[in-house]
Image (cartoon, grey):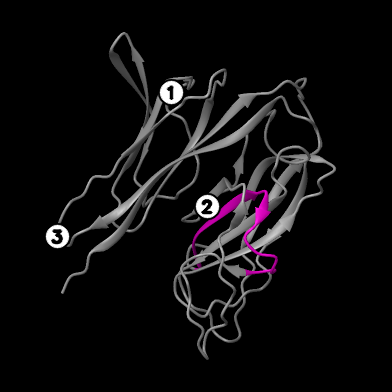
Amino acid sequence: MPSVSPSLVSLVVVFATAAIWPSAESYRVDKYSLLMPNVQPKKMDLYLCTPIRIDPSKSYFIVGFEPKAHGHTSHHMLLYGCSDPGSEDPVWNCGEMQMASSTHKAYMHSTPCKSGSNIMYAWARDAPTLKLPEGVGFKVGGDSQINYLVLQVHYHRTFDDDETDNSGIYLHYTEQQLDKQAGVYLLATNGRIPPNSIEHMETSCPLYETGKVIHPFAYRVHTHELGKVVAGYRVKNSNGIQKWDLLGKRDPMTPQMFYPIENNITVKFGDILLNF
């Protein structure tokens, strides 16, 4: 009997907002390796997380993400910024609850973040390195409330006894104060698709933060295997008339990298971001 298939549709928009620091036109960039510590998944569709603690006495700005992963091993990777990690263990299961067995190492189960969860980066389908625009970075450490970075890897195959994995991300960062802070705006929906049917999913979020102006510069789409197309828009209301501006539109089965925004627009108070 055909089963009902779970589905996920998401649009990730990377944006910059102005900060009060002076502009930095050139700065030193270093690289830090955030990798899985040679794990050995023994179950299909296992989600594993590993953390690093950030020096709270300093502020750092992440300006690039260089993936170290392959699509034949990992379905996707996510990088979370957390106030507190979901576990103090070096590795834990941060997906569905798993039952211990003689053939599967039972990792402790928890969420990626215990508090202060922020998605900072996403990778799938052998996407290449993401480099942020000059003068733009994700602020971590210091007074940012991001005290930990947590890497999540979704493994879609089991490993043999002589196999281990150290997939992850090389983080490009600077200690130079940057004049624009990066952020991620995630629009996501999920549901189920009955067999032999077509389903449309959508979500929308209005911006109600006064004084904030968002400058989108990249987007990324993601679905599971049944997805055909994902599109994102900014909707602006003016005198009762809606104006729709395309942010991006992609086939989610192509490399799930970050692509440049289609239109040079800003998002302000009262605007709506939506995807379907």
26 with respect to 266 (left or right)? right
**Distance of mark 1 from mark 2, alpha carbons?**
23 Å
Image quadrant for the C terminus? top left
- Cβ atoms at labels 1 and 3 below 8 Å apart: no
Q: Amino acid at mark 1?
A: Asn
Query: What is the magenta range?
Result: 73-91
Q: Which mark is residue 196?
A: 3
Q: Is residue 205 left or right of residue 121?
A: left
Is 78 colored magenta in this rendering?
A: yes
Q: Is residue 69 visible?
A: no
Q: Residue 89 appears at what percent x and percent y?
A: 69, 69
Residue 42's tag is none
- In the rendered view, would you say 8 is above or below 138? below
The residue where tag 1 is placed is 263
Comparing 228 with 139, the one in front is: 139
Q: Which residue is mark 2?
A: 123
Q: Secondary structure at mark 2?
A: strand
